[in-house]
Image (cartoon, helix red, strand yellow):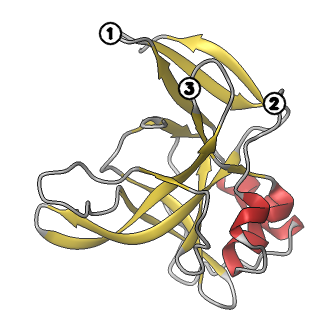
Amino acid sequence: MCNDYGIDIPFRLFVEAFSELRIPLDLSRGIPNLQPRDEIWPTERAPIVRWDGAAASIDNIRWGLKPHAPKRPPVINMRGEGRAFSRGRCLIPASHYFEFSGAKSPKTRWRFNKSGEDWFCIAGVLGDGDDGGRPVDAFTMLTVPDVAPIHDRQVCVLERRDWRGWLDGALEAREVLTPSPAGTFVVAKSTRA
């Protein structure tokens, strides 16, 4: 499952996409940091889009929800099937994500880019995080079953037409938390820089 992804979205393109989809953006707190990052790792802060009832806002928050048991790692991926996610929905903008295959280290690393699009949004859920004993806002990525040879699950990448319905709750989770069709991604073997 995804534990490494990147973002390289010029803010202008971000605003244009949300404008075309008629998703109002609240930028009253200023322009968020969308600095290009080839790799974002669990527990790092990253941009998400959340809905406040009238508009979407962009915030940089921690990746990984507080675990339910002590001494467990943060919850960075959560199964999407069988749940409604009626609150706390968010979008996680990304340019690409990585999956790893193989039983032993070093594992083979694969980079996934969406075919025909420079960036996309992963379905996410907001919740409580923990930053050294201090409570913080956090997010996790939702996953769905996959039949691809690299992994048996995949992050749930939402179609642009579904972004607002996911955010504002107009779409039920079961309608959009589905595997991406074959050919959605260009997949290439990747090496670390």
Three-letter code, disc 1: Lys
Q: What residue is pinned by disc 3? A: 151
Q: Quadrant of residue 130?
A: bottom left
Q: In this rendering, is residue 49 above or below 145? A: below
- Residue beneath the point at 58% across and 72% down: 89
Q: How many residues crowd mark 3 within 10 Å: few (<14), some (14–19), many (20+)?
A: some
Q: Nearer the viewer, mark 3 or mark 2?
A: 3
Sequence-wise, which precedes: disc 3 or disc 1?
Answer: 1
Q: In this rendering, is residue 17 above or below 86? A: above
Q: What residue is pinned by disc 1? A: 104
Q: Quadrant of the C terminus?
A: top left
Three-letter code, disc 3: His
Q: Are marks 2 and 1 in contact (CB under 8 Å)?
A: no
Visible residue check, residue 37: no
- Residue beneath the point at 42% across and 37% down: 3
Sequence-wise, which precedes: disc 3 or disc 2?
Answer: 2
Sequence-wise, which precedes: disc 2 or disc 1?
Answer: 1
Inter-mark Cα distance, 3 to 2: 19 Å
- Residue beneath the point at 69% across and 67% down: 173
In the picture, the disc for residue 115 is 2
**Direction front: furthest residue:** 82
